[in-house]
Amino acid sequence: MRFLHSSSCQGPPLGCQRGYIWIVIIISVASWIEGGMSWWANSSAGKADASHMGLHGIFYGSIIYLWYLARKGKLSIADEIRARFRCARWNVIILLIFLAGLVFGEALPKFWRPTAVSGPDLVVAVVIGIFGTLLTIFILRKMRVDHGGLEYGEECDRGRRSSHRVLFLDAIGDISISLAVLISGVNIWIDPRRSWLDPILTFIAAGIIIWQAYAMLRSLRKDEFSHDGHHH
């Protein structure tokens, strides 16, 4: 995968944009496969993990679209940063609604009356999700190395550098959630009577996802205020 160098205040290097396109494709495919297999395995924790990854794909896609508008001169840097925060906020709102339905509509009933979870299917589903996240981390790391942390102009890219860092750390957080679900799946595979682990991991995953979402919004909001203050 070759990343091309380019410097413009109307968008990041073209190689970075191509990198994000690859990420959107990888995340979309991995999240759909993991989500479908988690549904087949009757795993609420797997669905939570897949939904988190899928909504990340939507957010990455919105970043690409905003960069396209900036490159065409239809958005200023300040407008782009504000739009990115609004996209992230709506992303989090949708995720919270889905998680609330998953926790209260599916995981809680399973906690009181455990239903069978297919351990082998859950393990395969989560391994696919982990593989997709690892590829995402590799591409983000590759872009950071090739483009000096996206530092192609301090005035131009203060918010973008921070967003890149937030997405990288968020991907690392995804791995921790997936590993926890994977351990749960292995335990259920070994002993199907441990299906009660699935709703517990759903609660834990939901808590971690909410914490990550808050951290991401706080960082992007800080970028917005920092950029506005710098120009006023």
Image (cartoon, grey):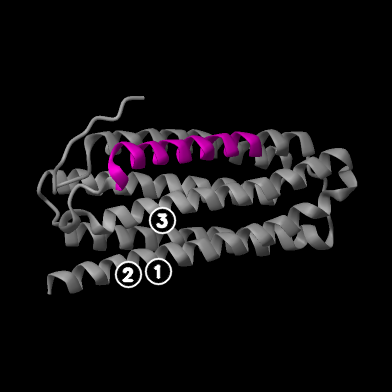
The residue that appears at 18% across and 36% down in the rendered structure is 6
Tell me the distance, in whole angstroms, between the alpha carbons under discs 1 and 3: 10 Å
Q: Residue furthest left?
A: 73
On-image quarter of the C terminus: bottom left
- Residue 131 falls inside the magenta stretch: yes
Q: Which residues are magenta?
A: 126-149
Which sits in the foreground, 118 or 22?
22
**In the displayed structure image, the side of residue 202 where residue 186 appears, left or right:** right
- Residue 232 falls inside the magenta stretch: no
**In the displayed structure image, the side of residue 2 where residue 173 appears, left or right:** right
The residue that appears at 31% across and 36% down in the rendered structure is 146
Q: Secondary structure at mark 3?
A: helix
Residue 89 to residue 57: above or below: below
Tell me the distance, in whole angstroms, between the alpha carbons under discs 2 and 1: 6 Å
Q: Position of residue 170 (x, y in %)?
A: 48, 53
Residue beneath disc 1:
218
CB-based contact (under 8 Å), mark 2 and mark 1: yes
Q: Which mark is residue 166?
A: 3
**In the displayed structure image, the side of residue 223 where residue 153 appears, left or right:** left
